[in-house]
Amino acid sequence: MLHAPQSASRADQTLSLNMKLLAHHELEGFGGLGEGMGMQLTSDGRRILWLAHESAPKNFSGVDVTDPEHPKLIVQTELPHMKLRSNSLDVVGNIMVVAYQATSVGIKPAGIDIFDVSQPETPRLLSHFDCSGPYSRGVHAVWFVDGRYVHMSSGASDFQPRNPLDDQFYRIIDIIDPEKPVEVGRWWYPGTREGDEAPPPPRLPAQFDTGFRTHNTNVFPEQPNRAFIGYIDGGAVVLDISDMKNIKVVSQWNHSPPFNGFTHTVLPLFDRGLWIVSDECVQDNGADWPKLVWVVDSRNEANPVPIGTFPAPPYDAFAKRGGRFGAHNLHENLPGPTSFRSDTIIVGSFFNAGVRVYDTSNPYQVQEIAYFVPGAPKLSPAGAIQLNDVYVDDRRIVYTVDRFTGGLYILEMNI
Amino acid sequence: MTWSRDALAGKIPVTLVTGFLGSGKTTLISKLLLHPDMRRVAVVINEIGEIGIDHDLVTLSSENITLLANGCICCSVRTDLQETLRELFAQRRVGEVFDFDRVIVETTGLADPAPVVQTLASDTLLAAHYRLDGLITLVDGLHGVGQIDQQTEAVKQIAIADKILVTKTDLVTLDHLETLCGRIRQLNSQSPIEFIRQGEVEPKSLIELGLTSSRASLKTLQFLGEALNDAASADVTGTGRYLGQRSVAHNSAVKTLSLRFTEPFEWLSFSSALELLTTLRGPDLLRLKGIVNVDGEPVVVQGVQHIIDTPVKMDRWPSDDKDSRLVFIVRNMELDVIRNLFQAVGAIKSSSASTS
């Protein structure tokens, strides 16, 4: 052990393996970013990385990353008030969908905005789809990759949850006419809505009870009749959406209990019959550890079988480093032209354990092959980096964002 | 989703520095540690005390690890090298040791480097995170000729080296050096020789001697070496070109043999032949390097004695030449032995194919 001034692993220390920092952009002092990252290829050949902010006052930012070593902030927008967050966005062609979630129920606006970003410096609002209501905080996450359907985690004015923690469910919005979005499908966990026949689902112990509500709602062109849902304390839920008016459950897999809930992302690797399922850590200082990334054998989709977990970053080095420690977002193999796609290499953000790259070629023995843990960003209330989300482009450049102050980190992988 | 990972790019390269007792390893290492280009390099040595580092240049130190002002990490072997390399990686991952991207290992004077190569190839953790980048052998400019004549270990160290550093060149005449180089060339016809004095060497001349990527490039050809181009067809007796012809008259038991096969191999028959060869003649098979046509795909193989590294499938052929080409450095072995063995295995394969 080195006799360093403090304990050996320090929050101000940058750790890296096979990843090199190309550029760091603090977004003009508003470097607290959520989990919305999307890349637009403009008609004049520029790459614009769109980023949703974690909290007010900023809404979203557009960063020109055509030259990843010299990112340029080209636009940064404001939210209408401080009780709102955008958190999530997606972009297809020149259409961008942005989520709005309020700090409590009943606040407006809450829902989604649809923008025309063909002139990225001046996004033009096409429409707003209202999801506010007496029991709704609005929209937490959107998935929009085919140019037509927005799959989202949302409340609704007509939806009264039995437990206020269960306010967001799966909704599908058709934006074939982006000026007139319409709901075309919805599904919620049986027993969570007032009036349901099913009994309410048994809850996790109070300290881990984060709700039976949706987080990521992913649908891929490889299998457009399936929705892969991270249903938080309800686990991984796969739905048959071939008839959007009559959505059926295909399978459910939940590691909790005995684990501590919060299933966040279900990422299918279609060619390999696997799902990569990530949790989200939501408590500081390792209080909800372990928050993991799981490998699930889905060859028989009705009977998903967990076969392993990704090697977790070392607990001793990170649990008390500051802020949250554990899994969160994965790069989701988006179908667009600017997204990296791999059925073996998985890249994830792990809050204070940075961004990490895994090789799942052997699904029973996943290898960690690269990582980058930035030193604590200036003025961060967590006192450590809190990497919240990650996007990898087709050039295999990795973009990752801090939850509080650090902004955008652009990295190159040597893998 | 066709993009696939480079099988080698993410692994931390390890350079082994070997050389007979008194050949100048300690001098070289103590100079190297202080070189400005040694940032993010971990140097594993036998005994920190031997090196004598100026205290003003030490940033942090502990029982067995010293961080120098230039960012070089100097680590002494505690129990054994295997354990030390495992520990270093684990400590790097948790931030207890500063990030290093390269390791240089000083082997002990009498040591046969082959077991170290074996450790790197066979330990699961080490094989996953490290790759052997090169073997550097120091040859004493003053006493090298005598050592080659009398010490089998010195012969082996030279024969398997990827690069040879001749030391103490300020103490000898040009004629003497020429004689020495001739002797070295008999044992190792391919690897570059560099003359150094007072242990002064540029770190960059010690690195990237191995196969650094599974993506074919000019570097792949450099790694495979020019002896491959001269590889004789398996149908004709041939030996690799000797670059230093001066002392060919001195009959050495160590030889470089090159073979070329125009017919593609099936992996099973190729690996069986190789396995048979290493089982029967492992101690005499000092080094093997080459590119093999396996059902049309290029696969790089390399080995030291009975240890064959994990074969690396390249993304494409590095040149238009798609023949299998192998270079062996052997002791007391004739080309026929190797050629016959490969042909026999091929014959077994074809006879079993014809009877089935």
Image (spheres, coloured by chain):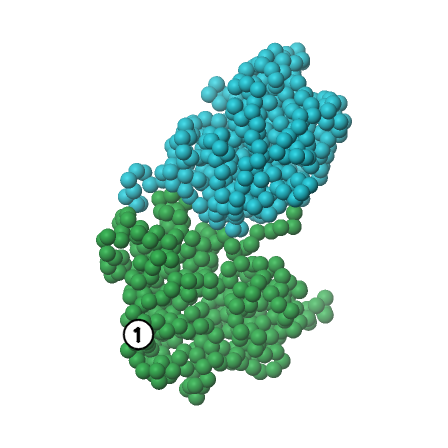
Question: Where does the image place residue A7, in percent across and percent down from the top left?
Answer: 32, 38
Question: On the image, numbered disc 1 is attached to which residue?
Answer: B168
Q: Residues within 10 Å of mark 1 (few under 14, many from 20)?
A: some
Residue B166's image quarter? Answer: bottom left
Query: Please, which chain is the residue tagged with disc 1 on?
Result: B
> Up-down: is A383 above or below B158?
above
Residue at 74% of width from left, 23% of height from top? A180
Closer to the camera in the image, A224 or A297: A224
Q: Residue at x 41, y 36 (%)?
A: A376
Instruction: Answer with left or right where residue B354 lies relative to residue A262.
Output: right
Return the x and y of residue A135 as percentages of the image width and height: 60, 13
Above or below A367: residue B238: below
Horizontally, residue B298 falls left or right of residue B104, namely right
Vertical position of residue A13 compared to residue B236: above or below: above
> Residue visible at 52% across and 80% down?
B241
**Residue B296 image-quadrant placement:** bottom right
- Which residue: 48% across, 40% down? A24
Helix, strand or loop for disc 1? loop
Residue A195 at least partly seen: yes
Q: Position of residue B124 (x, y in %)?
A: 46, 52
Q: Is residue A105 above or below residue B249?
A: above
Q: Using the image as rendered, state which of residue B192 and residue A304 is in the foreground.
A: B192
* Image quadrant where one finds the C terminus of chain B: bottom right
Q: Amino acid at mark 1?
A: Lys
Name the colour assigned to chain A in the rendering. Answer: cyan
Q: Could you say where residue A253 lies in the image, as x and y percent from the top left?
A: 60, 30
Q: Colour of chain B?
A: green
